Image (cartoon, rainbow, N blue to C red):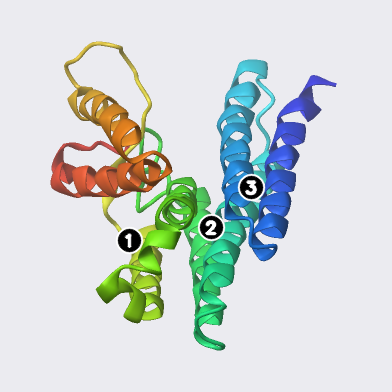
Amino acid sequence: MKKHIPNTITCLNLISGCIATYWAFQGDFKMALLFIVIGAVFDFFDGMVARLLHVSSPIGKELDSLADCITFGFAPSAIVFEYLRPETELLPFIVFVMAAFSALRLAKFNLDERQAMGFIGLPTPANALFWGALIVGAGDWMKTAPFISSNLSLIILGGIFISCYLLISEIPMFALKFKTWGWKGNEIKYIFILSCIPLLLLLGVSGLAAIIAWYIILSVFTSRKIKTN
């Protein structure tokens, strides 16, 4: 019985992604983001539970990637698509390239043995949270800001292409995994965690997007210190 528990949690992640996609196409970006966050919680716990119960399996690994592709690939793409759809007819369809690159990222992750204690390239949950939080927190502002509003589609699509690059890049990015709880060796992680608090307090939902951007910047500038194996 216990061998089915991690896969059940993974399926809950997948279902959360399906619900997030539904709300995205309904134009309710807050609900879409909420279910992406719920999916991220399930994604965090499925692997942990599998290790605790000693029931990790190849099928669980593949199922996890499939669920992540829906929740962190297709769902955020649907959010951006629906956000841009009133602006122009054809350009919004380009955003679904992000779902394809998310799938490619997940396939690479399954085969890459270097990513035990860190990541190579931007993790799909981080990318999904960035776009969901950006649209929910700053979507209305972007449609009224003088320069951004007149170039909204091009700016968003430019950001999408940057995301696609980061997803499959060879840039080492740290993970919030701790071998020890001391400051030494964990400086980057603790600095990141502490800096997240003021961003959330000052910016609200948009702060989550700012946190992901800060995570990328911090990873790039400290990449030589990040160990991924």
* 3 or 1: mark nearer the eye: 3
Amino acid found under the numbered disc labelled 3? Met
Can you see residue 39?
Answer: yes
Within-10-Å neighbours for mark 3: few <14, some 14–19, many 20+: some
Are the two marked residues, 3 and 1, in contact with CB atoms closer than 8 angstroms?
no
Extreme residue toward the bottom, this view: 90
The Cα–Cα distance between marks 3 and 1, rounded to whole angstroms, is: 30 Å
Quarter of image, res 173: top left
- List the residue tagged with mark 2: 107
Give the residue displayed 26% in from the left and 53% down from the top.
Answer: 171
Q: Earlier in the sequence, mark 3 or mark 1?
A: 3
Q: Does residue 56 lie above or below 170 as drawn?
A: above
Name the residue tied to disc 3.
31
Q: Is residue 124 left or right of residue 199?
A: right
Look at 40% across and 55% down and name the residue there: 138
The residue indicated by pointer 1 is 169
SS of the residue under disc 3: helix
**Relative image position of residue 61 (x, y in whole percent):** 63, 42
In the image, is residue 86 above or below residue 31? below
Q: How many marks?
A: 3
Q: Quadrant of the C terminus?
A: top left
Label 2 neighbour load within 10 Å: few <14, some 14-19, many 20+: some
**Cα gap from disc 1 to disc 2, whole angstroms:** 13 Å
